[in-house]
Amino acid sequence: MAVTRESQGRLNVFADEPRIEILTKESSGNKGSWLFTLAGVILVIGLIAYSLTIK
């Protein structure tokens, strides 16, 4: 943490910012994200089909 001292003697503390991670196309299209998306689509289709069977 960076600490500075003002002229009146007060201390200011600034948090260290995290490093920036640059995402590439390869990292956004991995198998895990596709499986998560597929599971979500199957869940939505299942909920719609279930709601149509309720009377």
Image (spheres, helix red, strand yellow):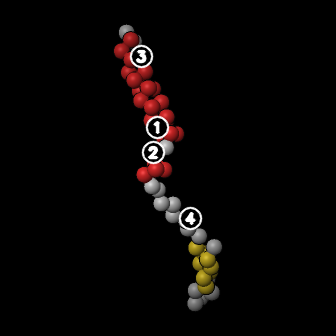
Residue 37's x, y, as percent? 45, 35
Q: Which mark is residue 50?
A: 3
Q: Amino acid at mark 4?
A: Pro
Pointer 1 residue: 34
Please tell me whether mark 4 sits on a helix, a strand or a loop.
loop
Report the number of numbered marks: 4
Q: Residue at x 45, y 45 (%)?
A: 29
| Lower position in the chain sequence, tag 4 or tag 1 | 4
Pointer 2 residue: 29
Q: Quadrant of the C terminus?
A: top left
Pointer 4 residue: 18
- Vertical position of residue 34 compared to residue 45: above or below: below
Structural crowding at the residue carrying mark 3, measured as other residues with C-alpha within 10 Å and reported as few (<14), some (14–19) or many (≥20): few
Residue 44's x, y, as percent? 41, 27
Q: Amino acid at mark 1?
A: Trp
The Cα–Cα distance between marks 4 and 1, rounded to whole angstroms, is 28 Å
Structural crowding at the residue carrying mark 2, measured as other residues with C-alpha within 10 Å and reported as few (<14), some (14–19) or many (≥20): few
The Cα–Cα distance between marks 4 and 3, rounded to whole angstroms, is 45 Å
